[in-house]
Image (cartoon, rainbow, N blue to C red):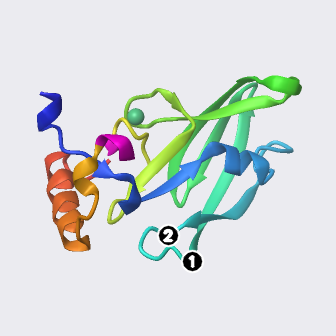
């Protein structure tokens, strides 16, 4: 079964780490709103500016709006008394530090839900052409229902 699972290479996805939102101060003062630079997989020389709105709704709980997509975040005490925030994946409800959004798809989900291939596990992507990757991605998204 695992051999049959199609995997999406990470480099055709937007990737967003919650720690970047934390370090940008978006979880401060009850939550803030700002544009967060996120690497654009279509053009590594530029960043996309992702609109992000964070609202702390209770102890260790926040609502995060990522480019219109509403997700949750939860925190636990981390080192130095600072809170350690994680996203709650809208697909599997697990806490995760990093979200992915494949090109052409609206929603962020965790790497497990999108079946993101780790580079070491996907030797067949070495040397693949852009067209091959695009064909694979289109097939994989159709198989997964296309939408998050
Ligand atoms: Zn998930």
Farthest-out residue, top: 77
Cα distance between the residues tagged 2 and 1: 6 Å
Residue at 28% from the left image edge and 58% from the top image edge: 126
Ligand 1 within 8 Å of disc 1? The answer is no
Badge 1, how many Cα within 10 Å: few under 14, some, many 20+?
A: few
Residue 78 visible in the picture: yes
Compared with 28, 34 (above or below) is below
Q: Position of residue 81 (x, y in %)?
A: 87, 24
Q: Earlier in the sequence, mark 2 or mark 1?
A: 2
Ligand 1 within 8 Å of disc 2? The answer is no
What SS does tag 1 mark?
loop
Locate residue 31 relative to residue 18 in the image: left or right. right
Front-most of residues 43 and 110: 43
Q: Position of residue 43 (x, y in %)?
A: 46, 77
Residue at 67% from the left image edge and 36% from the top image edge: 62
Do residues under tags 2 and 1 come within 8 Å of each other at their CB atoms? yes
Residue 146 visible in the picture: no
The part of the chain drawn in magenta is: 116-121
Compared with 105, 18 (above or below) is above
Residue at 39% from the left image edge and 53% from the top image edge: 10
Front-most of residues 37 and 8: 8
Q: Which mark is residue 46?
A: 1
Q: Position of residue 22 (x, y in %)?
A: 74, 45
Residue underneath mark 2: 40
Locate residue 108 relative to residue 142 in the image: left or right. right
From the image, which quarter does the N terminus lie in? top left
Q: Which mark is residue 9?
A: none
What SS does tag 2 mark?
loop
Badge 2, how many Cα within 10 Å: few under 14, some, many 20+?
A: some
């Amino acid at each position: 079964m695992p051999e049959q699972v199609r995997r999406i290479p990470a480099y055709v996805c937007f990737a967003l780490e919650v720690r970047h939102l934390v370090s940008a101060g978006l979880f401060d003062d009850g939550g803030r709103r700002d544009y967060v630079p996120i690497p654009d997989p279509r053009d590594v020389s530029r960043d996309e500016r992702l609109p992000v709105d964070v609202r702390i709704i209770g102890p260790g709980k926040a609502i995060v709006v990522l480019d219109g997509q509403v997700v949750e975040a939860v925190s636990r005490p981390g080192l130095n008394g600072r809170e350690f925030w994680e996203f709650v994946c809208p697909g599997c409800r697990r806490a995760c530090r990093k979200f992915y959004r494949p090109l052409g798809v609206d929603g962020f989900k965790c790497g497990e839900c999108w079946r993101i291939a780790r580079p070491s596990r996907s030797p067949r992507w070495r040397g693949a052409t852009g067209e091959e990757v695009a064909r694979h991605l289109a097939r994989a998204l159709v198989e997964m229902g296309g939408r998050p």
